[in-house]
Amino acid sequence: MNTTFSIRPILPIRVFGFLTLAAALLATPAWAQEASPTGLWKNVDDVSGKPRALVRITESNGALLGRIEKVFPAPNEDPNPKCEKCEAANKNAPVVGLVILSGLTKEGDEYTGGQILDPDNGKVYRSTVRLTDNGKKLSVRGYIGVPMLGRSQTWLRQE
């Protein structure tokens, strides 16, 4: 007697595929909340609304560091600007390659306790950053004293 056994899957493949897709979609919001500000960001001027630079943010020992990779000068501006108003080691340093964001550490849903350098005026301000729009935007605030005495920019994720 030749008996052939057929094993049927408990769940058809289509149902299994659907359940896998549903699980992945449900997990996405948890992943998005864990997004990091590390990566490449387009700095958009809060006054003109025009892109000013690309800033690469990295993390080392739990602290963020932001370095300018590229600038977008206006037609009448120097294509290779220097930080003429900066002090100490940054005095007359090329803006491309300049560290403008440093020392920010995660505190709740934002990064605080750091500083930001404005290459246009050479001043260093206290800073906070917060991811928005599911990690696609970065709200960057520079201030003197207390955060409400400052200004904010929205940077756009590039990668």
Image: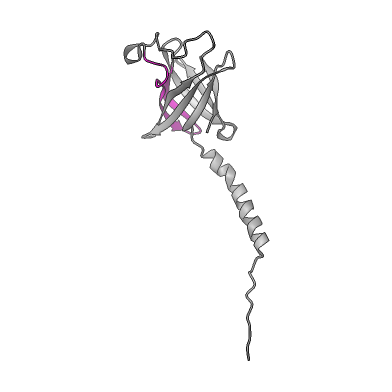
Q: Is residue 29 above or below residue 85?
A: below
Q: Is 89 positioned to the left or the right of 74 in the image?
A: left
Q: Residue 69: x percent and y percent? A: 44, 24
Q: Residue 94: x percent and y percent? A: 39, 16
- Image quadrant in which you'd find residue 61: top left
Residue range (magenta): 93-117
Q: Is residue 22 above or below residue 51?
A: below
What residue do we see at 64% from left, 77% from top? 6
Q: Is residue 146 magenta?
A: no
What residue do we see at 60% from left, 32% from top? 133
Q: Residue 38: x percent and y percent? A: 46, 33
Q: Is residue 112 magenta?
A: yes
- Magenta stretch, main secondary structure, is strand
Q: Which color mode does the image show?
A: one colour
- Image quadrant in which you'd find residue 102: top left
What residue do we see at 32% from left, 12% from top? 88
**Between 85 and 126, the one nearer to me in the picture:** 85
Which residue in the rendered view is the most extreme toward the bottom? 1
Q: Is residue 21 above or below residue 36?
A: below
**Between 51 and 110, the one nearer to me in the picture:** 51
**Between 35 and 148, the one nearer to me in the picture:** 35
Which residue in the rendered view is the most extreme toward the left? 89
**Between 148 and 40, the one nearer to me in the picture:** 40
For the N terminus, the image quarter is bottom right
Numbered marks: total = 0
Q: Residue 93: x percent and y percent? A: 36, 14
